[in-house]
């Protein structure tokens, strides 16, 4: 569904800008940040349909963001993975960074369509 709200948290401004542009082009309403603290504040104030967490954050930051998203209306998390899938982090979906923007958009769309089926 177009217009779904996505919070995209990346650790690098260039990566954030690229992901944000690709998600917007795919039709999502995107809020982006490169700061974990700001992402947590946004999660406390707003409702999102999906949270995307970048691969360059520490395990502790990834865990914190996924737990906060889960506690905030069971918001699903798409974890962007580097060399490892971070299987011990409780995310609903995973995509490898090497899959690029096409992989990210496909994974987001698949996860959001599953969430719509579960909710509907």
Image (tube, helix red, strand yellow):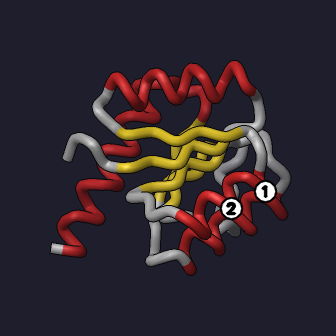
> Residue 120: image x %, image y %?
15, 73
Residue 90 horizontal side relative to residue 101, left or right: right
Are the residues flagged by discs 1 and 2 in contact, CB closer than 8 Å?
A: yes
Q: Residues within 10 Å of mark 2 (few under 14, many from 20)?
A: few
Residue at 73%, 39% (x, y): give it. 34
Residue at 35%, 54% (x, y): give it. 111
Q: Nearer the viewer, residue 114 or 46?
A: 46
Residue 79 appears in view: yes
What mark, if any, has residue 41 been given in the picture? 2
Q: Residues within 10 Å of mark 1 (few under 14, many from 20)?
A: few
**Which secondary structure, mark 1?**
helix
What mark, if any, has residue 37 been given in the picture? 1
> Residue 74: image x %, image y %?
45, 76
> Residue 49: image x %, image y %?
38, 58
Residue at 46%, 68% (x, y): give it. 75
Q: Give residue 10's quadrant in the image.
A: top right
Q: Give residue 11's quadrant in the image.
A: top right
Residue 82 appears in view: no
**Which secondary structure, mark 2?**
helix
């Amino acid at each position: 569904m177009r217009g779904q709200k996505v919070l995209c948290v990346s650790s690098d401004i260039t990566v954030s800008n690229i992901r944000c542009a690709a998600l917007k082009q795919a039709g999502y309403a995107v809020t982006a940040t490169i700061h974990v603290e700001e992402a947590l504040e946004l999660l406390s104030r707003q409702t999102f349909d999906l949270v995307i967490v970048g691969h360059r954050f520490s395990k502790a930051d990834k865990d914190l963001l996924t737990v906060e998203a889960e506690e905030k209306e069971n918001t699903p998390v798409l974890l962007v993975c580097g060399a490892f899938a971070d299987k011990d982090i409780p995310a609903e979906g995973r995509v490898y960074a090497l899959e690029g923007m096409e992989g990210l958009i496909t994974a987001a769309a698949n996860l959001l369509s599953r969430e719509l089926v579960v909710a509907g």
